[in-house]
């Protein structure tokens, strides 16, 4: 059960990172592009999201 909770937390952090990267990308109307931060948050968000989903998917419940 602990691994599923960790997977859920990682997935949520990944979604937040991807949303932040997307919002930063869309709000660059003033000409200043923070490419490094967009790439950093996008890549970290994708890694956290994929790791969380795979942790949830591969964890099996114990039958008692």
Image (spheres, rainbow, N blue to C red):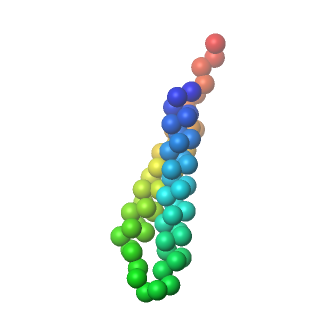
Is residue 33 visible to us here?
Answer: yes
Residue at x-position 49% and y-position 58%: 17
Residue 5: percent from the left, percent from the top? 55, 34
Residue 25: percent from the left, percent from the top? 49, 74
Q: Which of 48 and 33 lies nearest the eye of the viewer?
A: 33
Where is the N terminus found, in terms of image quarters? top right
The part of the image, by quadrant, that contains residue 58 is top right
Determine whether 21 is above or below 34 in the image: above
Is residue 50 visible to us here?
Answer: no
Residue at x-position 42% and y-position 56%: 44
Residue at x-position 53% and y-position 42%: 9
Task: Report the residue that reaches farthest toward the right.
Answer: 64
Task: Report the residue that reaches farthest toward the front.
Answer: 30
Determine whether 64 is above or below 58 in the image: above
Residue 50: percent from the left, percent from the top? 50, 49
Q: Which of 27 and 53 lies nearest the eye of the viewer?
A: 27
Residue 56: percent from the left, percent from the top? 56, 38
Number of dots carrying numbers: 0
């Amino acid at each position: 059960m602990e691994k599923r909770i960790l997977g859920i937390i990682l997935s949520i952090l990944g979604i937040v990172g991807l949303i932040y990267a997307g919002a930063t990308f869309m709000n660059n109307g003033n000409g200043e592009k923070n490419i490094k931060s967009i790439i950093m948050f996008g890549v970290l968000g994708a890694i956290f999201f994929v790791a969380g989903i795979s942790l949830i998917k591969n964890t099996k419940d114990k039958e008692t």
